[in-house]
Image (cartoon, helix red, strand yellow):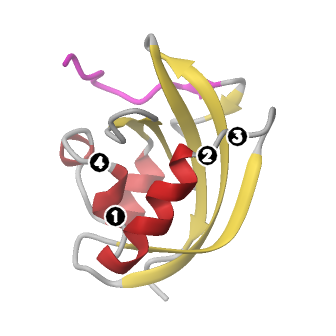
Amino acid sequence: MKTEVAPERQILGIPFAGNVHAMWVFDRETLVFLDVNDAAVQTYGYSREEFLRMRIVDIRPPEDVPELLRETKSPRPKGPSTGDGWRHWNKSRKIFPVAVTSWELTFRGRPAELVLARGDSRL
């Protein structure tokens, strides 16, 4: 799969590359990261290249993955969907709380989801 050198500047009209919050796009069928912004790289500690070889389950504690899989299979409402109470972990496996807002879209020809995550791995 071809990976882009730099993240998209905007997606769905939302600033992506320079957004202060961690953002990514994932494939809704394979759960593979399709694009990530610099804030995600800083927050989670993975390089852009590492992210693009990972799936969204890789940034969740194992005990949270079943709920994530249930949620990703559910149809999304039109427009943004917001949820809090999620937990992610960074490259060093430090767990931190996040609130996410997501939008369904087609990205590079794939059914995908754009995610904006608000959380701080330094907590």
- What residue is pinned by disc 1? 59
In front of the other: label 4 or label 3?
A: 3
Q: Is residue 112 shown to the viewer in this render?
A: yes
Circle 1: residue type:
Ile
Residue 23 magenta-highlighted: no
Q: Residue 3: horizontal and vertical position, in percent?
A: 25, 22
Farthest residue in the right direction?
Answer: 78
Residue 47, above or below 34: below
Residue at mark 1 to residue at mark 3: CA–CA distance: 21 Å
The residue identified by callout 4 is 55
For the point 70% across and 40% down, the residue is 76
47 horizontally vs 26: left or right = left
In the displayed structure image, the side of residue 73 where residue 62 appears, left or right: left
CB within 8 Å, label 2 to label 3: yes
Whole-Å distance between the Cαs marked 2 and 4?
18 Å
Where is residue 56? Give x, y as percent. 36, 52
The Cα–Cα distance between marks 4 and 3, rounded to whole angstroms, is: 20 Å
Instruction: Let me know if residue 7 is in the magenta part.
Output: yes
